[in-house]
Amino acid sequence: MADHDRRLVDLYDDDNPDGPDHDFYRAIADESGARSIIDLGCGTGILTVTFAGTGRRVVGVDPSATMLDHARQRPGAGSVTWILGDSRQVPVCPDEPADLAVMTGNVAQHIDDEDWARTLRDLRGALRRGGTLAFESRNPSAEAWRGWTSSERTTRDTAHGPLEEWSRADEVSPGVVRLIASNRFLRTGETVVETQTLHFRTRSELDRQLDAAGFTVTAVFGDWRRGPVVDSSAVLVVTASAR
């Protein structure tokens, strides 16, 4: 897998700041009394480091070496164990299984169906019985991708000079969207193109997949305030208990 351009990683936190989504996951950690937390797809670690506290064991796992390099430079990064990889590298500790596993942002949607089933099984194996899995996925009914194709190019100032951006999104098969994001650094004339395939899963699909992996869904919310899911809900926020 190709890694991310370091300049775009430098901009990641500005584009994906700490907010109500992170507040939700921190609240789940506190409410569940989690002492051991796995953040799968932790990216730059903006949320991960805030889980760390007295007596807590926190592991951040991500397939991007560049993202993890950024994460390791954060204040508080020394309190987190950083691991390069995917769910196959999530540590399994039979004597001290994890209490909570999270996948935030687009992590769940980046994983294709075959690897998704394995990912859920891997996380179940790392969690204690009764442990919590929490993640989000965009609600396919809202069809958010229809607004991701840029009709015009936009330019903004960054630490790496002016950046021109445009994108195109196409539903290549039911529930599968290919997003092509183009980024042109005007100072050097370089264009970095990132192609992502995102899987939009329905609530019923998620229920079945989680059940097959050994989880029982405990709640599905339609927003970060724990409101109900409606057709227009942007996200499906899922919590599940390991059986």
Image (cartoon, grey):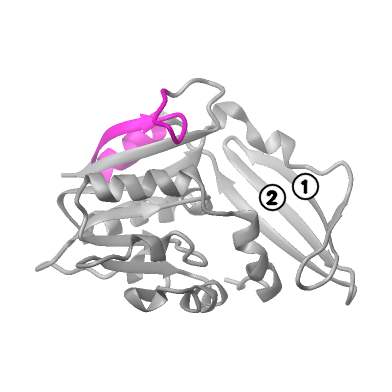
Which residue does the image show at 79% across and 59% down from the upper left? Answer: 182
Confirm or deny contact between disc 2 and disc 1 (CB under 8 A): yes
Give residue 168's mark: 1
Badge 1: how crowded within 10 Å, few (<14), some, or many (20+)? some
Q: Is residue 177 above or below residue 1?
A: above
Q: Is residue 47 above or below residue 68?
A: above
Q: Quadrant of residue 228?
A: top left
For mark 2, what is the residue? 179
Is 41 within the magenta? no
Residue 212: give x, y in percent of width and height.
27, 42
Element under disc 2: strand
Q: Earlier in the sequence, mark 2 or mark 1?
A: 1
| Disc 2 from disc 1: Cα separation | 6 Å
Give residue 44's mark: none
The region drawn magenta spans 204-228
Q: Nearer the viewer, residue 10 or 104?
A: 10
Q: Nearer the viewer, residue 72 or 123?
A: 72
Which residue does the image show at 42% across and 25% down from the upper left? Answer: 227
